[in-house]
Image (tube, grey):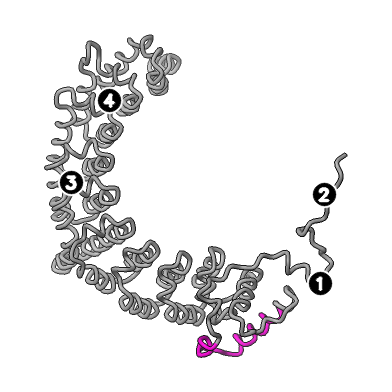
């Protein structure tokens, strides 16, 4: 047997009174706070009553029992912060009152500490939320761009009172809505504000965005595009709600406030539809906007739809247009797909095949028949559906056709595939089509039973 390894530094003497100090890692403290003078926190005040004083007494006792130290402010900001972090991790009953003076730092420390603050905002009383708001306002410029600290602001928007939200939004407007919109963490705060605030406050945010010269750079931005999408969604919902209640003037005014966004989208629809982020904004516009603005965007899409069908991102815009667009738009797309032998080219294309499948899934019966008729035409000396079944991409289109075909076209489709079963069974991708056919085609036993049931009656 091999000898035992020598004792190393990671073998602790658990009976030594200070052993626990080496077992727990030191929690990371951002450098910005390690040198912060204690005096800057001496002015912090919050409502204190007998209950909160008693709670602070329990905090000291708890620290004395668990870490063999009294939790007393030492004047060393870094050490005090580590103590507060240790307490909230080890005490399920901890509240924000217990970490007064450290709330912003705790919210920024790590994911676990941030979640603790969010839980307290959700379940705490008004005075506890007010304490969090005061901490957030004092450290607002440090919290909104922070990967964990921004959730303190979101939590206040979610669970704070209307008055608290108003105070927080005053800080947002004082900071810079545009800068926050373009920040990876700040954009989350703006999105949350758009989602939970009342109509007047949302309109004020939109007014701040109207000051920008062009919307396109925001749409192309990986963070800004999310705010633009949310603005389209929320303002459109407000306008539809106003129209449903008979207030047409209010609905028109609400949609006029995002006209600067829709105008830029319509004017640059092809460029945006071919962009990773721009295609999302175009989809939100045709999904949420009222009829007039939606039709404006759809007609621009119609004028360039042939250039979008095969595009990596444009194909998603075409799929959305098929779902929401008018008969005129759908007919134009069907004609482009079925013109000549185009259906075979598109079905074999990595991105255009998505459009063909969407047409089979969501189109009306006569449009679906046009697509299936084009697929069943002869192509390169044999039935086109056989050639498509052998293709590594087009076989997915054929499987979708098997799922969606109806009536005589279904029977013809099944007959063509069955008559070419031997040829298809030798093609690696066509095998999947045969499996799908077997799943959709009723077995002989089920057909026989159906006949017996019919004869019985």
Residue 287 lies, with reference to residue 433, above or below; the image says: below
User: CB atoms at circles 4 and 1 under 8 Å apart?
Assistant: no
Residue at 44 percent across and 81 percent down: it is: 138
Which of labels 3 and 1 is toward the front? 1
- Quadrant holding the C terminus: top left
Where in the figure is residue 441, as x and y percent of width and height? 38, 20
Question: Which label was assigned to residue 5?
Answer: 2
Q: Earlier in the sequence, mark 4 or mark 3?
A: 3
Callout 4: helix, strand or loop? loop
User: CB atoms at circles 3 and 2 under 8 Å apart?
Assistant: no
Which of labels 4 and 3 is toward the front? 3
Q: Please indicate, yes or no, whether residue 5 appears anywhere in the rendered image.
A: yes
Q: Earlier in the sequence, mark 3 or mark 1?
A: 1
Q: Residues within 10 Å of mark 4 (few under 14, many from 20)?
A: some
Residue under label 1, please give it.
Answer: 17
- Quadrant holding the N terminus: top right
């Amino acid at each position: 047997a091999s000898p035992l390894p020598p004792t190393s530094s990671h073998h602790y003497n658990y009976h030594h009174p200070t052993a626990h100090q080496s077992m727990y890692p030191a929690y990371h403290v951002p450098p910005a706070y390690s040198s912060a003078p204690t005096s800057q926190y001496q002015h912090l005040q919050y409502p204190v009553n007998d209950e909160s004083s008693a709670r602070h007494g329990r905090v000291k006792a708890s620290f004395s029992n668990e870490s063999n130290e009294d939790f007393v402010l030492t004047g060393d900001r870094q050490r005090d912060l580590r103590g507060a972090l240790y307490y909230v991790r080890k005490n399920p009953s901890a509240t924000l009152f217990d970490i007064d003076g450290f709330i912003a730092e705790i919210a920024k420390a790590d994911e676990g500490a941030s979640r603790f603050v969010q839980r307290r905002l959700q379940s705490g009383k008004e005075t506890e939320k007010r304490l969090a708001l005061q901490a957030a306002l004092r450290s607002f410029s440090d919290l909104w761009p922070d990967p964990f600290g921004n959730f303190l602001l979101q939590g206040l928007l979610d669970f704070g009172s209307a008055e608290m939200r108003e105070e927080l939004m005053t800080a947002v407007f004082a900071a810079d809505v545009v800068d926050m919109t373009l920040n990876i963490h700040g954009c989350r705060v703006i999105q949350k504000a758009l989602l939970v605030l009342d109509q007047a406050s949302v309109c004020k945010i939109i007014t701040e965005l109207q000051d920008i010269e062009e919307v396109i750079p925001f749409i192309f931005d990986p963070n800004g595009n999310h705010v633009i999408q949310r603005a389209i969604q929320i303002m459109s919902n407000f306008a539809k709600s106003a129209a449903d209640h008979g207030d047409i003037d209010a609905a028109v005014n609400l949609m006029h406030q995002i006209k600067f966004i829709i105008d830029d989208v319509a004017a640059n629809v092809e460029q945006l539809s071919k962009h990773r982020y721009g295609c999302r904004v175009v989809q939100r516009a045709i999904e949420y906007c009222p009829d007039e603005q939606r039709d404006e965007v759809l007609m621009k899409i119609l004028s360039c739809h042939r250039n979008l069908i095969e595009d990596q991102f444009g194909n998603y815009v075409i799929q959305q247009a098929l779902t929401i667009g008018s008969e005129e738009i759908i007919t134009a797309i069907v004609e482009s797909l079925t013109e000549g032998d185009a259906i075979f080219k598109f079905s074999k294309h990595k991105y255009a095949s998505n459009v063909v499948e969407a047409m089979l899934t969501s189109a009306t019966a006569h449009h679906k028949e046009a697509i299936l008729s084009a697929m069943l035409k002869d192509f390169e000396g044999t039935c086109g559906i056989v050639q498509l079944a052998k293709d590594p991409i087009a076989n997915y289109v054929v499987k979708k056709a098997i799922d969606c075909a109806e009536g005589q076209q279904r029977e013809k489709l099944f007959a063509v595939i069955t008559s070419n079963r031997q040829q298809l069974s030798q093609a690696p991708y066509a095998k999947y089509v045969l499996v799908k056919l077997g799943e959709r085609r009723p077995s002989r036993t089920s057909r026989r039973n159906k006949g017996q049931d019919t004869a019985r009656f």
